[in-house]
Amino acid sequence: MNTSDSAPYRITLADFTIPFVSFGLLLGAALMAAEPKMDLGMARTVYTIWATAALVTPALCTFALPGNSDRLRNTWILFWTFSLIAYLVHAGYAFFSVYEGSTKQFLEGQGTAPAVVNVIFTLWWILDVLLAWFYRSGARWLRHERVGAHIFVGLTFMVSTVFLKHGFINVIGISLTVSVIVCLMVRFDARRRLSQATAAQ
């Protein structure tokens, strides 16, 4: 996708429906599935990151795909935004329930280095979503920032869901990783074909 497009989003009801319904169903299911568990806060922390990983997959894929249609841009920004909201719900349960709102417990539970990475991860994602909605520009720094944010967020999800965590999250993580790789292959193939066509002229 062209990351430097400064045109306004023209989001139709059809564009909005699938991301919003996906967000509502996945986040709702994550919260409700935790109800029978003894530790409700921990269960909701776990299940909401499952929902987040599922929601961020279409965002990363549409960002990786070639082209710059309204449908592609709208799908990206909506899933990128809704997955962030789901992640913030996850972060809220993690900090206020699992770590009881204590920065000390958060640092001890995460470890200093992972905690710093999590804070940077969260703040950068929030920043990029805000920039995407309110500061659309063709500036080079913004293009680099957006690509960097997607690489950082994408790799963090891939590593954590495939290697660092165990259970059903691995299925989601593998699906995310394979989907993004396929979309990147499509992008590189389209770029190769364009280069060949240009050289042949």
Image (cartoon, helix red, strand yellow):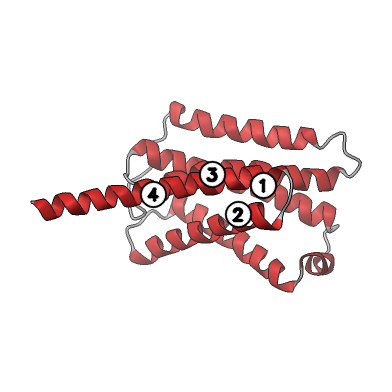
Residue count near mark 3 (Cα–Cα under 10 Å), binned few <14, some 14–19, many ≥20:
many
Which comes before the other along the chain, label 2 or label 4? Answer: 2
Left or right of 116, for residue 190:
left
* Residue beneath disc 3: 57
* Residue beneath disc 2: 157
Q: Is residue 82 above or below residue 14?
A: below
Which comes before the other along the chain, label 4 or label 3? Answer: 3
Specify the amino acid type for callout 4. Met
Foreground of the two, 39 or 102: 39
User: Residue reaching furthest right?
Assistant: 38
Specify the amino acid type for callout 3. Thr
At horizontal 71% and vertical 42% (from top left) the residue drawn is: 168
Asked if marks 4 and 3 touch (Cβ < 8 Å), the reply is no
Left or right of 5, for residue 98:
right
Q: Nearer the viewer, mark 2 or mark 4?
A: 4
Specify the amino acid type for callout 1. Asn
Q: Secondary structure at mark 3?
A: helix
Q: CA distance from mark 2 to mark 4?
A: 19 Å
* Residue beneath disc 1: 170
Residue count near mark 2 (Cα–Cα under 10 Å), binned few <14, some 14–19, many ≥20:
many
x then y, percent, for residue 198: 14, 53
Q: Nearer the viewer, mark 4 or mark 3?
A: 4
* Residue beneath disc 4: 185
Foreground of the two, 170 or 59: 170
